[in-house]
Each structure stands twice: as C-alpha cells, then as structure tokens.
Amino acid sequence: MAAPTRRERLRKAAVAEIKDGARRLLVTGGVDAISLRAIARDMGMTAPAIYRYFPSLEALVAALAGDLYDELRLLLETARDDAGAEPVDQLLTMSRAFRAWSVAHPAEFGLIFGAPTPGRNALVDGCVDPGHPGSRFGAVFIQPILDLWRRSPFRTPPPELLRQRLGGRLEPLRLSHGELPVEVAYAFLSGWTRLYGLVAMEVFHQFDWAVTEAEELFELELEMLTAQLLADPPNQAPLGAKG
C-alpha cells in the first residue's frame, strides 16, 4: 500500500481537528452548540472552508457520532478481552465498562444514545450494515449472548411466539449480524433495553429522586440479567409456554 501523500495527511489532520472541535463544543454546550462557524473560528479558518471537509453540519455530527461509537466499542473490546473466555464474565465486564464510560461522558452519551438529532438520525439509518459503527458496537454484546446460546439455549419466549408478536421487527438485527436465531436477537434487544435504560436514567439524573447509589442498583440488575441467560433448570418450561 502506498504511503499517504502530504495532501492526504494534511486533509486527515484537518478532519481530525474539526471533529475534535465539534466534540469540545458538544461537551461544553451540548449538541446545539456545535457550529461550523465556531469551529472554523477556533481553527483560524473561514466558515466556508469547513465545507471542503464536511458538506453540512449534519454530516459532521454524523461523523462525530460514528467516532464515538468506535471509541466506545474499542473500550468494550478491551474489557471483553481482559475478562477471559467465559461469556458471562465478558458481558458483566463490558456492561460495567459501558456504564463507566457513559457516566464519565454524559454529553457524548447524549449524542449517540439520547434524543434524536439530524446528524445522528442520518447515521442510524444505515445501522443494518454490518460495517456500520453502531452495528460493530452492538456486535460486541451480541457475540457473548450467541456463545451462551450455542453452549446451552437459555430461557426465552418460544420462537413461534416471538415471530408472532414481533413479526419482522427483529429481521434487520438478525440479518445485520449473520441471521441470528430469533431467540438470541430477542435476548440481546431485551438485555440492551434494560442495560441502556439503567445507564440513561443515571446519566440524565432520573434516578436522583429515588436512588442514592445507582451503581448498586446497576449491579443488582446485572445479576438478574445474566441469570436469565443461563440454561433452563431441568424440567422447567420455557417462558411464554402454555401448560
């Protein structure tokens, strides 16, 4: 592979500086504070010059959101690798790393997991592509769940009930991750809803009225969640089955 040219290096550095500027504005003022004009001013550029790198503010926000997904994914992959080969340990360690990053980066969390914004909406629209930053992020949680399923199927509603109730709504998730078994797709979505809900409520201070130690509640919920991913006890009917 040929070495990048000087022009390519300069362009890459400029793009990185622009995104760094956008992240600083996000952290200090929220997504509404991100402005091409403000970034250009900080860089000593004219505002129109930014358009040589990003065609719109929405494109810049989408690129920043993609970088944040990748940053978080790499953090979780490191946590997973440090946890060893046991899928439950991987899930626990990654979940704790996800919470720690989110609490330490509330503005960044808000951009990629909070209220919809035009730039993030454009990014999310392509999330069915396996190479999409959001898909790659989700895959780090899906793989340990799939490993547990292959080892010993865990309790879920029967697959025919899942297909009846959810119809094709799980299909994009299944196809973007190699046609997951519908039970695994459901378990991931159910677990992610629970994990995300806990973290979002802590990040956005929705627990303050009721909980003094959000981490303790998080740990308790992790215990409950991982227990549900263990194999059925002998002679116990699956959830949703009729006697």
Image (cartoon, rainbow, N blue to C red):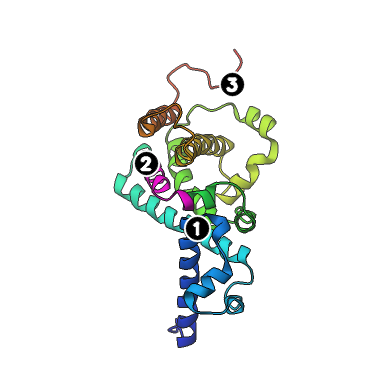
The residue tagged 1 is: 26
**Boundaries of the magenta span:** 94-108
Alpha-carbon span between mark 2 and mark 3: 30 Å
Q: Is residue 84 visible?
A: no
Does the magenta segment cover residue 141? no
> Which mark is first along the chain, 3 or 2?
2
Q: Which residue is mark 3?
A: 240
Q: Is residue 136 above or below residue 193?
A: below
Residue positioned most to the top: 243
Disc 1 is placed on an element classified as: helix
Above or below: residue 227 compared with residue 63:
above
Q: Position of residue 216 (x, y in %)?
A: 35, 30
Secondary element at tag 2: helix
Neighbourhood count class around disc 3 (C-alpha, 10 Å): few under 14, some 14–19, many 20 upward: few
Mark 3 element type:
loop
Is residue 97 found inside the magenta-colored segment of the image?
A: yes
Q: Are marks 2 and 3 in contact (CB under 8 Å)?
A: no
For label 1, count other residues whose C-alpha is less than 10 Å away and answer few (under 14), some (14-19) or many (20+): many
The amino acid type, in three-letter code, at marker 3 is Gly
Q: x%, y% of residue 215?
A: 36, 34
Residues marked 1 and 2 touching at CB (< 8 Å):
no
Q: Which mark is residue 131?
A: none
Which picture quadrant has residue 3? bottom left
Residue 127 vertical placement versus 153 (above, below): below
Residue plotted at (46% across, 71% down): 16
Q: Main secondary structure of the magenta part?
A: helix
Image quadrant where residue 120 sits = bottom right
Is the N terminus in the top left, top right, bottom left or bottom right quadrant?
Answer: bottom left
- Residue picked out by circle 2: 96
Q: Residue at x 38, y 40 (%)?
A: 87
